[in-house]
Image (tube, rainbow, N blue to C red):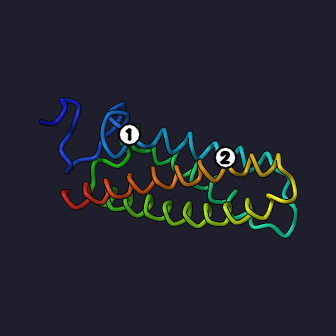
Amino acid sequence: MAATTAQSMGSLPSGVEICTTAPDIFYLPELVFGGLVWILVASTHVVLPNPLGWVMFVSVFCFVMTFLWMVVFAAGGHKSSSGWAAADFIYHGLAVLFYLSAGVVLAFITIVMKTVDFRTYQILISAVVFAFATTLLYFIHAILSAIRWKHF
């Protein structure tokens, strides 16, 4: 039996309902984990040429877009339209692809940095863990958004 805070899958939440309904409950963990990737990567010294720029782009882009997406949903700007449900799925699917590619790049750079600087290596290991955890959160959000879009 569903919890009393659950809403029908054919509508989009607004206001504080985004903190109690799936898939929107994942906004805050996505922001926290994505912000940690951003902070951890920014705290390392970047030697050029280095693909950590892609990781920084992905973490900053997804952080800002997720925050804006959450504000639109909280303010009810979507007006519970099916187009927004589709856009929610598309955005989170794109975020999964971005974070997965950034996580792979970050893992490669981490392996390379193992022999250079142990402190940077430890920071990057943490960033890799949070990057893949964030990828998982966005993946779950995308799957649940697809299910919601299908039932719209």
Circle 2 sits in a helix, a strand or a loop, which is it? helix
Circle 1 sits in a helix, a strand or a loop, which is it? helix
Quadrant containing the N terminus is: top left
For image coordinates 60% across by 50% down, the residue present is 129
What's under tag 2, amino acid-wise? Ser
For image coordinates 34% across by 46% down, the residue present is 23
Mark 1 Cα-neighbour bin, 10 Å: few <14, some 14–19, many ≥20: some
What's under tag 1, amino acid-wise? Ile
For image coordinates 82% across by 46% down, the residue present is 119
Quadrant containing the C terminus is: bottom left
For image coordinates 57% across by 43% down, the residue present is 33
Where residue 114 appears, as percent x and y from the top left, is: 79, 58
Numbered circle sitting on residue 25: 1
- Which of labels 1 and 2 is toward the front? 2
Numbered circle sitting on residue 132: none
Where residue 59 appears, as percent x and y from the top left, is: 63, 53
Name the quadrant containing residue 99. Answer: bottom right
Where residue 95 appears, as percent x and y from the top left, is: 50, 60
Where residue 62 appears, as percent x and y from the top left, is: 57, 54
Establish if 94 lies above or below 22: below
Task: Report the residue marked by disc 2.
Answer: 126
Name the quadrant containing residue 36. Answer: top right
